Amino acid sequence: MSLAIVLSRAQVGVEAPAVTVECHLANGLPALTLVGLPEGAVRESKDRVRSAILNSGFQFPARRITLNLAPADLPKDGGRFDLAIALGLLAASAQLPALALQEVECLGELALSGGVRPIQGVLPAALAARAQGHTLIVPAANAEEACLASGLRVIAVTDLRQLVAHFNGQAPIAPYVSSGLLHVSKPYPDLSEVQGQTAAKRALLVAAAGAHNLLTLWYVTKHSTP
């Protein structure tokens, strides 16, 4: 199949509008064209994706490649589309089944080695993916954040080769199970948190240093209003 479509999401403030990554392979001299209002980091994705695919043991298509990030009037920035672009290229070149990419949304930046790096703004994308009933694929470092959208099926990945093996049915990845938010116990109150009261704090320090007894008196003054 020479055409593959992968779903992803952009980041616009606290919103995560849908982005469709379309990958088409045509005959002709090898070239890659990226359209759809990409900013600098997105235009550079073609070099990251090429190295990631080759270093993961897959073939980079030696054909005329057109990548479209739709809608065309929505600015795209960051490396969050790297993983979707790589999957689109592999699906279009029949290195993974294109049907497996249906009902799936992908986010993640690729390292040159094929590793999947974390991105920002995962929670809004997770909430939007849940509303659409889609599975969300995210970097392993973002999995806990994605799971804050309860009821969402999350697939956490560490590298491109692992994800392709999942889609090819060679090594399916189980949905990520959140361990919950870590409970951080509050530290014992400290005098440094008290603003002012210099004389009182000095008295407390002297009493504690010398193991002296201390009697604290509290005065409450009532002020009448006219």
Image (cartoon, rainbow, N blue to C red):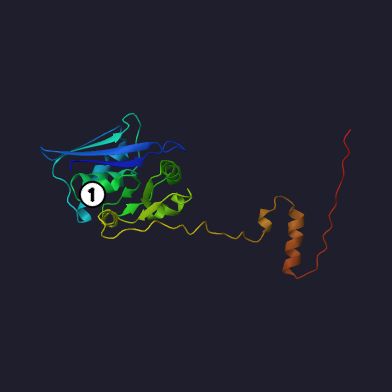
Q: Quadrant of residue 3?
A: top left
Look at 42% across and 36% down and name the residue there.
12
Residue located at (33% from left, 28% from top): 73
User: Split into 4 quadrants, where in the image is the N terminus?
Assistant: top left
Residue 190 position, x and y percent, is 67, 59
Furthest-top residue in this view: 73
Side of 184 where 36 appears, left or right? left
Furthest residue toward bottom: 211
**Place of residue 210 in the rendered image (x, y in percent of width and height, measured from the top left):** 75, 70
Point 29% across, 32% down: residue = 36
Q: Amino acid at mark 1?
A: Pro
Q: Nearer the viewer, residue 202 or 155?
A: 155
Residue 223: x %, y % from top left: 87, 41
196 with respect to 77 (left or right): right
Q: Position of residue 66 (x, y in %)?
A: 20, 36
* Residue named by callout 1: 97
Q: Residues within 10 Å of mark 1 (few under 14, many from 20)?
A: some
Q: Nearer the viewer, residue 164 or 211?
A: 164
Residue in the foreground of this view, choosing between 183 and 4:
4
Camera-nearest residue between 63 and 189: 63
Helix, strand or loop at label 1? It is: loop
- Can you say whether 205 is above or below 135 in the image? below
Q: Residue at x 29, y 52 (%)?
A: 111
